[in-house]
């Protein structure tokens, strides 16, 4: 694993570099002083990206042409896959990272893709000497870190519940495509196993969120964080819920895509994630709040990348290969380092 503590001269490659979330990724990495190699399949959009970011290398690259991916990641220390649908891109990008001998992160929120990648690559990549972190975003990575912080010194829990509260959800086109692809393929963790998610049993229940959200009706979900959490935290039950307002937005085909509410490009959307773990009569809870579920992915990914490149992973060696962020980083320290997130115990 790369333990060089000077990341200033290292380069990060981003595939899908003209996507909605990628604009925030580019800004984060540039502000942190890393070099950038940007790639995407559309030559016209890549030309515009090169003009907007003259400090970065740019490449027309597609998953159908491995040589183009090799050119994108050449000289990079880590690649971030920001291109959906991720069912089409994770395999080729993981293979490109392996050929180049570099670390890999993706930002998928697609539960079936996250499950497939863990089941397909976790063991084969274990001896690679490289870290592969899938689903390192608002879904998947962030709840995993919160659940890890909530567990603390517990070796196991009886139940882990992740509850999401969004004031609204204006989905990107990528989110809509991912939802269509994931339909009928989601699972939940029950009885210590991944079992099919049964929408017929999705009856609304109430969840008492921390202030200012308060008690709201929520619906059960099958989410990427149920996969990441279940890979390293011991609990027979890992559940996920979301309040009704954003789900109604997501179901409405007329809900527009997110729009910028400030010069930094972030939307005005607010979110809260509440994680509760139980063990017998004991209960531990951690919550986090922030703005814009897409934009917050960027500082989480950038912080992870910088820590990986600087060798700031958990002591004792969590090994390499396909990992959840809670396996790799000190969860409390990591969460406290992200200025876009305010988290607390309750």
Image (cartoon, helix red, strand yellow):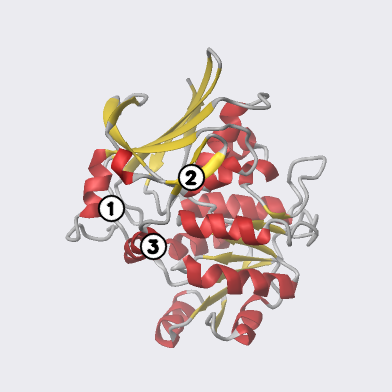
Give the SS element for disc 2: strand
Q: Position of residue 68 (x, y in %)?
A: 60, 85
Q: Residue at x 40, y 86 (%)?
A: 44
Who is closer to the viewer here, 152 or 159?
Answer: 159
- Report the residue marked by disc 3: 178
> Which quarter of the figure has residue 128?
bottom right
Q: Residue at x 49, y 49 (%)?
A: 224
Check disc 2: other Cα within 10 Å, few if <14, some if 14-19, many if 20+: few
Q: CA distance from mark 2 to mark 3?
A: 20 Å
Who is closer to the viewer here, 218 or 21?
Answer: 218
Which of the marked residues, 2 or 3, is nearer the chain's N terminus? Answer: 3
Check disc 3: other Cα within 10 Å, few if <14, some if 14-19, many if 20+: many
Give the SS element for disc 3: helix
Which of the marked residues, 1 or 2, is nearer the chain's N terminus? Answer: 2
Q: Residue furthest left?
A: 254
- Report the residue marked by disc 2: 195
Tell me: 42 left or right of 228. Answer: left
Instruction: Quarter of the image for the N terminus: give it.
Output: bottom right
Who is closer to the viewer here, 275 or 116?
Answer: 116
Q: CA distance from mark 3 to mark 1?
A: 25 Å
């Amino acid at each position: 694993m790369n333990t060089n503590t000077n990341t200033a001269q290292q380069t990060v490659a981003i595939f899908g570099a003209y996507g909605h979330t990628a604009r925030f990724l580019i800004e984060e990495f540039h502000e942190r002083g890393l070099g950038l190699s940007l790639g995407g399949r559309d030559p016209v959009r890549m030309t515009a990206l090169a003009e907007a970011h003259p400090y970065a290398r740019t490449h027309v690259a597609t998953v159908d042409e491995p040589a183009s991916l090799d050119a994108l990641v050449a000289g990079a220390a880590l690649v971030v896959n920001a291109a959906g649908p991720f069912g089409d891109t994770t395999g080729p990008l993981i293979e490109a990272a392996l050929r180049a001998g570099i670390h890999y992160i993706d930002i998928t929120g697609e539960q079936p893709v996250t499950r497939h990648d863990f089941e397909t690559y976790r063991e084969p990549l274990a001896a690679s000497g490289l870290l592969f972190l899938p689903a390192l975003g608002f879904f998947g990575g962030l709840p995993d870190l919160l659940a890890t912080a909530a567990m603390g010194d517990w070796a196991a829990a009886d139940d882990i519940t992740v509850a999401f509260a969004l004031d609204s959800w204006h989905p990107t086109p990528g989110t809509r495509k991912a939802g269509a692809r994931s339909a009928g393929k989601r699972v939940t963790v029950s009885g210590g196993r991944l079992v099919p998610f049964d929408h017929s049993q999705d009856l609304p229940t109430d969840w008492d969120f921390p202030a200012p959200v308060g008690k709201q009706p929520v619906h059960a979900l099958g989410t990427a964080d149920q996969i990441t959490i279940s890979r390293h935290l011991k609990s027979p039950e890992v559940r996920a819920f979301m309040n009704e307002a954003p789900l109604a937005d997501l179901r409405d085909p007329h809900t527009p895509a997110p729009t910028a509410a400030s010069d930094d490009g972030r939307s005005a959307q607010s979110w809260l994630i509440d994680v509760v773990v139980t063990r017998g009569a004991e209960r531990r809870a951690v919550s986090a709040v922030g703005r814009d579920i897409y934009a917050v992915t960027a500082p989480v990914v950038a912080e992870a990348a910088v820590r990986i490149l600087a060798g700031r992973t958990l002591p004792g060696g969590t090994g390499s290969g396909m990992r959840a962020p809670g396996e790799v980083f000190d969860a409390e320290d990591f969460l406290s380092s992200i200025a876009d997130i305010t988290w607390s115990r309750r």
